[in-house]
Image (cartoon, rainbow, N blue to C red):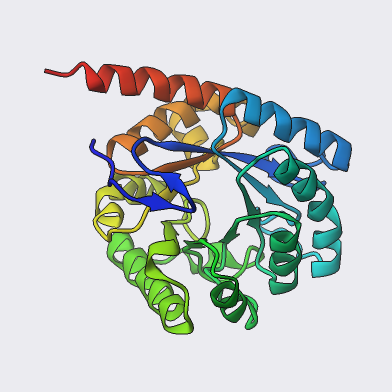
Amino acid sequence: MVFAPFAWAGLALTRPLVMGILNVTPDSFSDGGRHFTPESAIAAGREMLADGADILDIGGESTRPGAAPVTPAQETARVVPVIAALAAAGAVISVDTRNAATMHAALDAGARIINDVSALTHDPAALPLAARRGCPVILMHMRGTPETMNEHAVYGDITAEVLSELLAARDAAVAAGVRAADICLDPGLGFAKIGAQNTALLQATPRLAATGHPVLVALSRKRFLGALSGEAEAARRDPESLAAGLFAVQRGAHILRVHDVAGTVRALRVWQALMSERA
């Protein structure tokens, strides 16, 4: 795999990047409540940086299937102290939010990237804000909302439909004033995708990479991996996540969004060394 020789969010995409997941929530599917206080979340973020994370993705609202929404005020109160502290420590931070008010506060606190599971469609103020601030954005594919998305997991050709809908979101962002070079695409594994639909979409990563945008793959500890391995407990799915993550970068993914930063960094280091030794 040869990575595109361009930069995104000020980061050189000459190797796979690792994004560490930092959920400041009580109810995320794998680690809800582990880092719910600012002190715990900041300590966890510092550990991820020491382990080699290129980006920290900080969120204050669970978007697991069936999750209830929180208000932007609640979300902002959760994430801003953590973002401010870790930005001051030199971290490249993305804010994981659907809400423009949270985006605004997070960018003011030092976040550099907006990561929106709704591809900037949930909040009418999100697209204008992203364009006005001129920041990189991650557009993820999802149908419906976290509460309803599994009802919308009906596809004829899942790859063609996800790609078409992602590119429509891309075009809307560009039309609103977001620079095309600032856009990263995420196929949204587990979001309005069930079981083998995720596998098919992951296998189609080269088609996403062919768009010319960086591709982020977020598959860490997800249920479809447990179905493949027989592991029912999300927190025990790091081996599955490493295997699938290496498969993804082999097929063109530029960024892996993961819980296990240390393990992913080490696995990628070995993968890169072996790839560089190929005849």
Residue 74 seen: yes
Instruction: Answer left or right for 116 relative to 61.
Output: left
Locate residue 33, reporting x and y percent.
82, 40
Residue 246 against residue 142 in the figure, above or below: above
Q: Nearer the viewer, residue 157 or 16?
A: 16
Instruction: Answer left or right for 125 relative to 256.
Output: right
User: Would you identify the image quadrant in which residue 277 lies?
Assistant: top left
Locate residue 191, reporting x and y percent.
53, 57
| Residue drawn at the location 38% of the way across and 69% of the way down | 180
Instruction: Answer left or right for 188 relative to 14.
Output: right
Q: Quadrant of the N terminus?
A: top left
Residue 34 seen: no
Q: Quadrant of the C terminus?
A: top left
Instruction: Answer left or right for 83 relative to 11.
Output: right
Residue 143 against residue 56 in the figure, above or below: below
Q: Nearer the viewer, residue 142 or 107?
A: 107
User: Would you identify the image quadrant in which residue 71 lies?
Assistant: bottom right
User: Would you identify the image quadrant in which residue 253 lies?
Assistant: top left
| Residue drawn at the location 70% of the way across and 54% of the way down | 110
| Residue drawn at the location 43% of the way across and 63% of the way down | 183
Q: How many marks?
A: 0
Locate residue 106, reporting x and y percent.
73, 60
